[in-house]
Image (tube, rainbow, N blue to C red):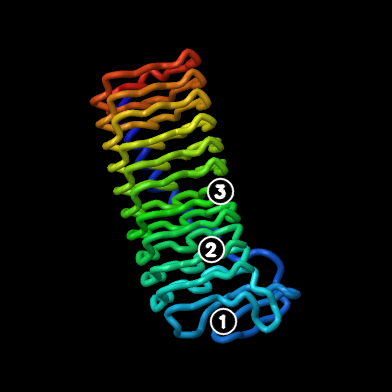
Amino acid sequence: MNKRFYAMIALAIALVLPILMLSNYTNTGADPLGSGEYEGFLYTFDGTDATITEYTGSLTDIEIPGEVNGKTVVAIGNNSFGNKTFLNSVIIPDSVTSIGGGAFNCCVNLTTVSIGGGVESIGGGAFNCCIGLTSVIIPDNVRSLDNAAFMRCANLTSISLGNGVEFIGSSAFSECASLTSVEIPDSVKIIDNTAFSQCKNLSSVTIGSGVESIGNATFMGCTNLSSVTIKNGVGSILNATFSECTSLTSIDIPDSVESIGSGAFSQCTSLASVIIGDGVKSVGGGAFYGCTNLSSVIIGDGVETIDNQMFSG
């Protein structure tokens, strides 16, 4: 088999998957019954619930109202504040339950955002390319962070993920070049493909016990990643998950993990020590391809299938 095969798999995943990252920018659901304006905020409404659809004002620091003309603001619509480069800070009220796709896309001067405690979902690309953001607190009530939610927030140094988050979408924090550490709470079930890929300064990651699968290329290209803690309870590690994490020196895979995908740790050139737990049944092709400094490998008793290219290269 061509020695470049697994490297090509990893590259293909990184290039192709983000194409779909902004797929949920389109409004769905029933047509609104009416529309209105309140202090520069345009909105639509259905009964007593209102959705902010656009901001026509010029204030740099805004507090989105919890109520407009007697209607409760429950949502921030898709692209409603997109490309408002004059925005510096935003406060989202507790009445809001959803932040739509691309809601604050490319608000490049946005430095502070306060997400209300009522928010349950943050849409695809909601804060994509908000390069002024340095920190984000995700409240406990949030259940899902959709594709590319905070992608390319280049100056984002810290994130606090609430204990209610269950789903982290594809490329949700990809290319957040200043992010240094991530602690994924036990509530998270799915970390989707490329979620934290190409976070070049990410050095420490803890993955919670509730994660069913760590997606394809999730941490691919995190070249400064040196500490990875995978809690017991994690179910599977998919293809190219930690590919090209060139600062990673050791990995301990707990007994709960049942499968390790193709190229999962490929090109981790500093990786010296690997412990594979007793629960692992299969290890994919080229899982440790290109790990040129690997000197110690402990394989658990449960492994049934090992691809003959597991350590090639």
Decide: is 283 above or below 138. Answer: above
First of labels 2, 3 by sequence position? 2
Pinpoint residue 111: horizontal percent, then vertical percent.
39, 68
Q: Residue 41 bears which disc, if any?
A: 1
What's the amino acid at mark 3?
Answer: Asn
Q: Is residue 113 left or right of residue 28?
A: left
x 59%, y 77%: residue: 65
Q: Earlier in the sequence, mark 3 or mark 1?
A: 1
The local secondary structure at tag 3 comes to loop
Q: Mark 2–mark 3 contact, CB under 8 Å?
A: no
Q: CA distance from mark 3 to mark 1?
A: 32 Å
List the residue tagged with mark 2: 101
> Where does residue 207 sit, x and y in percent of width and height?
46, 39
First-in-chain label (1 vs 2) = 1
The amino acid at mark 2 is: Gly
From this view, report whether residue 278 is shown above or below residue 203: above
Disc 1, SS: strand
Type of the residue with mark 1: Phe
Q: How many residues crowd mark 3 within 10 Å: few (<14), some (14–19), many (20+)?
A: some
Foreground: 158 or 265? 158
Q: Residue 196: give its label.
A: none
Task: Please report the residue visible at 70 percent of the width from the left and 74 percent of the height from the top.
Answer: 32
The answer to whether residue 79 is seen in the rendering is yes
Q: Are marks 1 and 2 in contact (CB under 8 Å)?
A: no
Q: CA distance from mark 1 to mark 2?
A: 18 Å
- Within 10 Å of the Cα at label 2, are there few (<14), some (14-19), or many (20+) other Cα atoms? many
- Viewer-nearest of labels 1 and 2? 1
Q: What residue is shown at x 39% (from left), y 54% (from top)?
A: 158
Residue topped by disc 3 = 163
Tell me if residue 103 comes above or below residue 203 in the rendering. Answer: below
Question: What is the x, y in percent for residue 220?
Answer: 36, 41
